[in-house]
Image (cartoon, grey):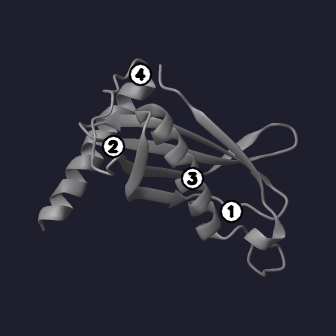
């Protein structure tokens, strides 16, 4: 079973632009995404990690001042020393209903005490959703590797 890491934020005015209906800065959301993804990767690898890349980040809907943002992060794929983490960000209404506002995929490398890459436990998908995410992660990895050789 893949462990899910969850975080909750209230969108405060200092996190927003100056529009009449203040929207959350994308960069602020990206910071929260990197933080929760790092926690999920560290918990999974049981060691320090470093962000290798933000592979995909899609802004679907805005968040506004005083909204509650709920984030869920989980490992979707592992290599020998690297892992991919998916982060879903939602705006949660007072009723508890959630709307997906962002999905991001980040890649991390596990580090030993000397800050060198170290092996991570292999992730084996159990559920159908985990298997779909694993397959999609392999395709994203192929694209990343192709870009590196171009």
Mark in the foreground, 1 or 3 = 3
What distance separates the C-alpha of mark 4 from that of mark 3? Answer: 27 Å
Q: Residues within 10 Å of mark 4 (few under 14, many from 20)?
A: few
Q: Which residue is mark 2?
A: 112
Residue 47 at x, y percent in the picture? 42, 38
**Going 33% across and 43% down the picture, which residue do you hit?**
112
Q: Residue furthest front?
A: 114
Q: Earlier in the sequence, mark 1 or mark 3?
A: 3
* Location of residue 7 with respect to 134 vertically, above or below: below
Find the distance from the CA under tag 1 to the CA under tag 3. Answer: 20 Å
| Helix, strand or loop status at disc 4 | helix
- Res 62 label: 1
Q: Nearer the viewer, mark 1 or mark 2?
A: 2
Badge 1 vs badge 2, beta-carbon distance below 8 Å: no
| Residue 120 position within the rendered picture, expressed as x and y whole percent measured from the top left | 32, 33
Q: Is residue 21 above or below residue 18?
A: above
Distance, label 4 to label 1, CA atoms, is: 30 Å
Q: First in sequence: mark 2 or mark 4?
A: 2
Classify mark 2: helix, strand or loop: loop
Tag shown at residue 128: 4
Identify which residue, 116 or 39, lies in the foreground. Answer: 116
For the point 35% across and 27% down, the residue is: 123
Q: Is residue 15 above or below residue 128?
A: below
- Residue on which the image places disc 3: 35
Left or right of 127, for residue 110: left
| Picture residue at 44% right of the left edge, 27% below the top | 129
- Callout 2–callout 4 Cβ contact below 8 Å: no
């Amino acid at each position: 079973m893949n462990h899910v890491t969850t975080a909750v934020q209230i969108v405060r005015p200092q996190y927003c632009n100056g529009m009449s209906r203040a929207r959350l800065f994308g960069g602020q959301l990206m910071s929260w995404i990197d933080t929760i993804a790092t926690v999920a990767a560290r918990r999974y690898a049981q060691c320090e990690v470093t962000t290798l890349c933000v592979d995909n980040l899609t802004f679907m809907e805005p968040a506004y001042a005083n909204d509650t943002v709920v984030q869920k992060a989980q490992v979707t794929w592992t290599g020998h020393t690297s892992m991919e983490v998916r982060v879903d960000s939602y705006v949660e209404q007072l009723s508890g209903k959630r709307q997906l506002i962002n999905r991001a995929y980040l890649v991390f490398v596990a580090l030993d005490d000397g800050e060198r890459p170290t092996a991570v436990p292999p992730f084996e998908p159990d559920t159908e959703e985990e298997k779909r995410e694993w397959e999609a992660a392999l395709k994203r990895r192929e694209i990343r590797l192709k870009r590196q050789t171009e």
